[in-house]
Image: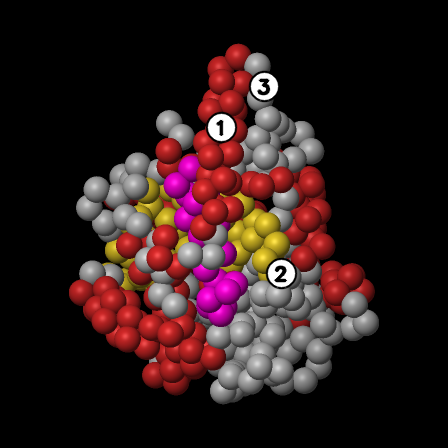
Amino acid sequence: MWTIGRGRDGVAAAVLAAVAWIGVLGTAAAADDPDRYGLITESSFANRFTDEVEVLWAQRVKRATFVGVGGLKLAYASVVVPNEKAAVVIVTGRTENLLKYQEVVADLVRQRYSVYVYDHRGQGFSERILADEPQKGHVGDFDDYVDDLDRFLQQVVNRNGHKKLLLLAHSMGGGVATRHLQRFPGAFQAAALSSPMHQPNAKILISADSSCAWFRWTGWFMSQSWAGGRARPYSHVAYDEASNEYTRSPARWARVLKDEADHPEVRLGGPTRGWVSEACAASDKQLADAAKIVTPVLVLQAGDDTAVMPEAQAEFCASYASTKERACDGGGPQRIDGARHELLIEADRFRVPAMTKILDFYGRMVAVK
């Protein structure tokens, strides 16, 4: 929720509050309507993915590389839309590759947004950090992810002179995006965070808190070893409702597996001790420095999330609102009950409300002068 201040800032806040209230009314009336934004449904997924998404990626999406911290070559994809509303930069989660966002890119292009998505160092189509052990998820310094994002903006995105820049980040990408918003204020005009990793659910020791405490103190030791002491190579398997903690959509999960089968080089396994240590340390900074963020933020929370800690998302929003006249959009994390971690590839009953909230939020932010 936005509150009204004094002077010029107060006028701006009043306008934003009015626009936000109108948007909330509209969302409440049609949050579950896929036709509102032309979203693909599971019943039409196979046909529309072939006819719309694959055609878009084959004909209009450009793929290339940019140079990240330390000279690593990082892969990206982009599509620039004529007469755009704004440009959206997608920051992906751990283990992911840019092909996982083909449907999301199509959703955004359909609404006249230009889109950029890239693969983090050490995963997807980007250069690996541990070249001789490519399935280990490792990073030497979490802020390398953040600096890579800033280099992506400077080397690629900003050169196209977009009207406004919006951020869409998922899971670990939400943690990277949060740190970028803290370190580089004003780079984005709005940020939507899907199941953001404001604290990882490390699942190594008794609890996430105890695991993070352990790895903060010991992560430097054998940092490139598998976290948990045993090998955890790539192991994505066919969809199973009971065991899949990420989504309830067999169709969308099957597409993820197809892309990973077609491109085995993108496969990634579990994290290293060093990655967990860095992720936990970064989560402390995200929560401690949330009040430094000046950008409007929407946080989407998956009700049945077991990959990250939802409690940290609430703590983030509370800290974000502590010293300013605004809160996370909607007043706090926008919870989608019953949804699993992967909101952007979830079943329609979860994905449609999530995408609608994101697109409504972007529409309101783009409308603000």
- Sooner in the amino-acid sequence: mark 1 or mark 2: 1
x then y, percent, for residue 6: 57, 14
Label drawn at residue 85? none
| Horizontal side of residue 56 vs 288, given as left or right | left
Q: What stretch is highlighted in magenta?
A: 345-364
Q: In this rendered view, identify the residue nearer to me: 150 or 339.
A: 339
**Disc 2: which residue:** 337
Q: Residue visible at 56% across and 41% down?
A: 329
Magenta stretch secondary structure, dominant: helix
The quarter in which the N terminus is drawn is top right
Q: Is residue 131 visible?
A: no
Which three-letter amino acid code belongs to the residue tagged 1?
Ala
Closer to the camera in the image, 97 or 365: 365
Look at the image and say whether residue 82 sits in the magenta stretch: no
Kind of residue sitting beneath label 2: Asp
- Residue behind mark 1: 18
Q: Distance between the residues labelled 3 and 1?
A: 14 Å
Res 5 label: 3
Q: In which quarter of the image is the C terminus?
A: top left
Q: Position of residue 58 (x, y in %)?
A: 21, 69
Between 214 and 295, the residue placed more toward the observer is 295
- Real-space CA distance between mark 1 and mark 2, rounded to the nearest whole angstrom: 27 Å
The alpha-carbon separation of the residues under discs 3 and 2 comes to 34 Å
Q: Nearer the viewer, residue 182 or 32?
A: 32
Q: 13 above or below 110?
A: above
Task: In the rendered view, tell whether residue 19 sits above or below residue 330.
Answer: above
Q: In which quarter of the image is residue 77?
A: bottom left
The crowding category of the residue bearing disc 1, from other C-alpha atoms within 10 Å (few below 14, some 14 to 19, many at least 20), is few
Query: Can residue 3 be seen from the camera position used here?
Result: yes
| Nearest to N terminus: mark 3 or mark 2 | 3
